[in-house]
Image (tube, rainbow, N blue to C red):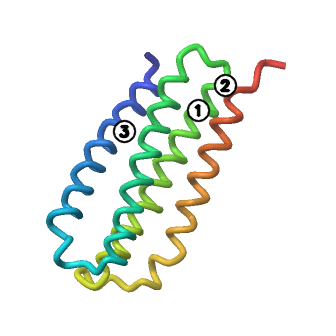
Amino acid sequence: MTDSSRLFVRIAALSGALAVAIGAFGAHGLKPLLTEYQLSIYEKGVYYQFYHTLAILLAALLMKGNDNERYLRLSGWFFTAGILCFSGSLYLLACRDILTVPAGILGPVTPLGGVFFIAGWVLLFLSTKGRQ
């Protein structure tokens, strides 16, 4: 296992553990405090965090022996940034009444996280290019 793949396995493990904890906190601790709409926003953040945690793990596992490891490394970083921006902003948006976070600050962060996710998937695709 390369240093990069080991790092991304660790990031995925941490992100997966956090997704479980954040999801459980939302389902049990925040449920009485959030509206159904806010809870659905929060849950969307958890789902995307889980999906992209698995994508980080996939990128890490594909690094072994891949001629295009740099694409996989970038893919892992873009997925990580996407989780932080997309899921993180959804968590804050869902809880903005409790935390008094102005929604205007977070508005542009969510789509930026989506762009990071898309870039991560494109880079994962590019990692399949053979040597020319």
Q: In which quarter of the image is the N terminus?
A: top left
Q: Which residue is drawn at 37% across and 38% down?
A: 12
Q: Nearer the viewer, residue 57 or 70?
A: 57
Q: Is residue 49 left or right of 35 when viewed as pictured?
A: right
- Check contact, mark 2 vs mark 3: CB within 8 A: no
- Residue underneath mark 2: 68
User: Residue placed at 75% from the left, 26% from the top?
Assistant: 129
- Amino acid at pointer 3: Ile
Per the rendering, the mark at residue 72 is 1
The residue labelled by disc 3 is 11
Element marked by disc 1: helix
Front residue (pair 82, 29): 29
Amino acid under disc 2: Asn
Q: What distance separates the C-alpha of mark 2 from that of mark 3?
A: 20 Å
Outermost residue on the right side: it is 132
Element type at mark 3:
helix
| Cβ atoms at labels 3 and 1 below 8 Å apart | no
